[in-house]
Image (tube, rainbow, N blue to C red):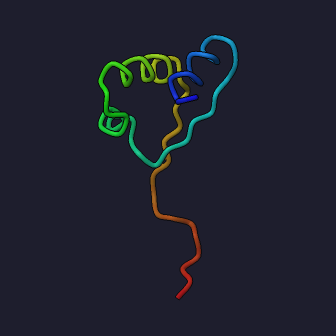
């Protein structure tokens, strides 16, 4: 099962949480095939509630 299969199976039926450190605008390059990227992003991005976090890391420096 690949990402497109998971998204198609859940689209319009169930919530899906996706996290990434890669900006959405770079997903086309990561997915590779334009047709698959269009299908995945059409189902994910257009109905998504996006939360983008900015700022310095809150992890403690281990020095």
Quadrant including the N terminus: top right
Residue at point 45%, 22% (across, down): 40
Percent across and percent down for residue 6 are: 59, 24
Left or right: 41 as drawn, with respect to 13: left
In the rendered view, tell whether residue 38 sits above or below residue 3: above
Relative side of 46 to 28, left or right? right
Quarter of the figure with residue 55: bottom left
Instruction: Write down the quadrant of residue 30 in the picture.
Output: top left
Q: Position of residue 15 (x, y in %)?
A: 67, 23
Furthest-right residue in this view: 14
Residue 11 falls in image quadrant: top right
Name which residue lies at 48% across and 42% down: 52
Residue at the limit of the structure toward the bottom, as seen here: 63
Q: Residue furthest top?
A: 12
Task: Residue 43: give x, y in percent of width and height.
Answer: 49, 17
Whether residue 57 sits left or right of residue 13 in the image: it is left
Q: Position of residue 44 (x, y in %)?
A: 50, 23
Looking at the rendered structure, the number of numbered marks drawn on it comes to 0
Viewer-proximal residue among 31 and 23? 31
- Residue depicted at 56% across the width and 83% down the height: 62
């Amino acid at each position: 099962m690949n990402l497109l299969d998971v998204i198609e199976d859940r689209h319009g039926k169930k919530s899906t949480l996706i996290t990434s450190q890669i900006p959405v605008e770079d997903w086309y390059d990561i997915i590779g095939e334009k047709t698959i990227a269009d299908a995945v992003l059409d189902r994910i991005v257009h109905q998504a509630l996006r939360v983008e976090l900015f700022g310095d890391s809150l992890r403690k420096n281990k020095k």
